[in-house]
Amino acid sequence: MSKNLVQFIIEEQRRVPGASGDFTGLLSDIISACKHIAHAVNKGELIGVLGSAGSENVQGETQKKLDVITNDIFIKATEWSGHLAAMASEEMDNIYPIPKQYPRGKYLLTFDPLDGSSNIDVNISVGTIFSILRCPEGVTNPTANDFLQPGVKQVCSGYALYGPSTMLVITTGHGVDGFTLDSDVGEFILTHPQMTIPADTQEFAINMSNRRYWEEPVQRYVEECTKGKDGGREKNFNMRWVASMVAEVHRILTRGGIFMYPFDTKEPGKAGKLRLLYEANPMSFIVEQAGGACSTGRERIMELKPTGLHQRVPVILGSKNEVERVVGYHKGT
Ligand code: AHG
Ligand code: MN
Ligand code: MN
């Protein structure tokens, strides 16, 4: 019988002397949340979950019904079991401390319950992203400040991709493993052990409609990609843009590539579009564990000291040699 995700994490747990099983328990809850979200996303209009919720999140984005529903699924699946002290999500203005009726645990959870939600009404892939941090020693009543840990402190991160198949991809710092949901038996089966990102690529992903707002180094890089062999590069490039970071990162984990949501001047005061704590950091942990690189253009993403729960950062990630090239273009700017 093929190995399932619960078996996989229990075997991982055995490698950690003295492990209490808390982490394994928390991951089981997250797996359960992702299965429920997969079900809701898959049923779509049959259960009336498409369309706008008519509300805005803290970032001024219109919430889809499924943004709200999936956020609720994540809370309900993880709050009860005593492994978490608090959680934070794209869809909640403030942190969500574990309610008094439940025991509190030693982990903090951040998540983007539905990534790429502009895709949901048009039936294109969406995902869920999560990151697990340790609650600081001695803290039983965490505040937002306790979440402001650099990405290098993550214990685990992962994403679920709701595409033609539902997949869950995770890292605990020992490489990256991918699992596919077998909906007949309701289990995630290990199908993509130790995923790696090739160092070179001929594929880039960026929202070209923002071109006029980019900085010079990104302009230069993309210009070179589009010119290919006619512009000094040794190869021609292909381009993709799904508008769902989960789907882009999954493609990069599968066949390489570079993804950029760089700094732009489109909206003054916003350093980028993607959020550090529940998009950029968890994805960076996965990409780096698979041999890729992640940068803002100027700094390694996972070394940034966060300053806010919903802080945005420029993101350039994927195949190492291309990311390093873009970072090189930023030097001295
Ligand atoms: P979310 O749906 O969680 O707000 O995230 C969407 C993000 C990301 O997944 C994607 O890469 C990017 O926004 C797409 O942005 P554009 O619509 O500007 O292309
Ligand atoms: Mn997102
Ligand atoms: Mn989202």
Image (cartoon, grey):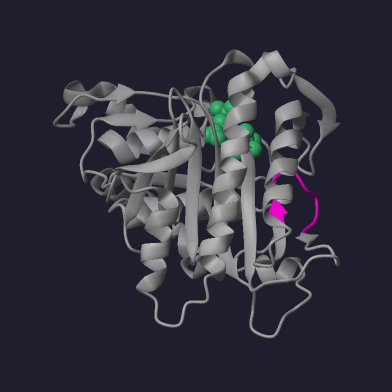
Q: Between residue 119 and residue 165, name the one nearer to us.
A: 165
Q: Between residue 318 and residue 251, name the one nearer to us.
A: 251
Counting from the top left corner in percent of width and height, residue 140 is at 75, 78
Rendered image quadrant of residue 46? top right
- Residue 288 lies in the magenta-colored region: no
Question: Which residue is rendered at x = 80% and y = 50% of the image?
Answer: 93
Counting from the top left corner in percent of width and height, residue 74 is at 68, 46
Q: Is residue 212 left or right of residue 285?
A: right
Q: Is residue 123 left or right of residue 74?
A: left
Can residue 147 be seen here? The reply is yes
Can residue 115 be seen here? The reply is no
Q: Is residue 230 left or right of residue 197?
A: left
Question: Which residue is rendered at x = 56% and y = 62% of the image?
Answer: 25
Look at the picture and state if 295 lies above or below 187: below
Counting from the top left corner in percent of width and height, residue 273 is at 60, 40
Query: Which of the four quarters of the rendered structure image does ligand 3 lie in?
Result: top right
Question: Which residue is rendered at x = 35% and y = 56% of the image?
Answer: 288
Residue with the most extreme bottom position: 138
Q: From which residue to which does the magenta span run?
A: 88-95
Rendered image quadrant of residue 132? bottom right
Q: Quadrant of the N terminus?
A: top left
Q: Between residue 155 and residue 326, name the one nearer to us.
A: 155
